[in-house]
Image: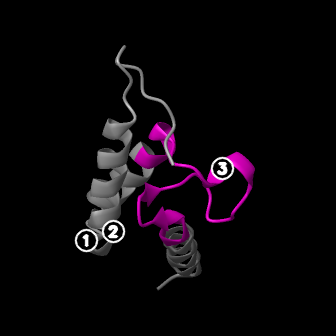
Amino acid sequence: MTQESDRTSALMAEAWRVLEGCAKPYGFVATAQDKDNYARLWSRDSAIAALAVLSNQHKELYPRVEQSISHLLDAVGVRGLLQHSK
């Protein structure tokens, strides 16, 4: 491995650690840290996390993708707007 590929591998491993820290029983939250409003389930952050998980086939996180979608669907209002959840 080259020094550049070693650095890329290390960065990818750290990125997955952060994403795993954002995986809560009810889905993906905006940050792995319990900070104010960011420890909530947001559609944008959940969607990006789900794309990363699915495109890289991180099957151990598939249940969090499912929970994100399920909880976000529960939050859809009568006008079809998606509110934040949990």
Upstream in the sequence, badge 3 or badge 2? 3
Residue extending furthest right? 36
Q: Which residue type carries mark 3? A: Tyr
Q: CA distance from mark 3 to mark 2?
A: 20 Å
Q: Is residue 25 magenta?
A: yes
Residue that carries the numbered disc 1 in the rendered image: 59
Q: Nearer the viewer, mark 3 or mark 2?
A: 3
| Front in this rendered view, residue 37 or 78 | 78
Q: Is residue 44 above or below residue 27?
A: above
Residue beneath label 3, please? Answer: 38
Q: Nearer the viewer, residue 21 or 76?
A: 76
Q: Are marks 2 and 1 in contact (CB under 8 Å)?
A: yes
Q: What are the residue bounds of the magenta stretch?
A: 19-46
Percent position of residue 80, x then y: 34, 18
Position of residue 30 in the picture relative to residue 44 (left or right): right
Amino acid type for the residue under numbered disc 1: Lys
* Residue at image mark 2: 61
Mark 1 Cα shell of 10 Å, populated few (<14), some (14-19), many (≥20): few
Q: Is residue 69 above or below residue 32?
A: above
Q: Position of residue 69 (x, y in %)?
A: 31, 46
Question: Label 3's element?
Answer: helix
Q: Say which element carries label 2.
A: helix
Measured in 3D between alpha carbons, the distance from the residue under mark 2 to the one under mark 1, in whole angstroms, is: 5 Å
Who is closer to the viewer here, 32 or 81?
Answer: 81
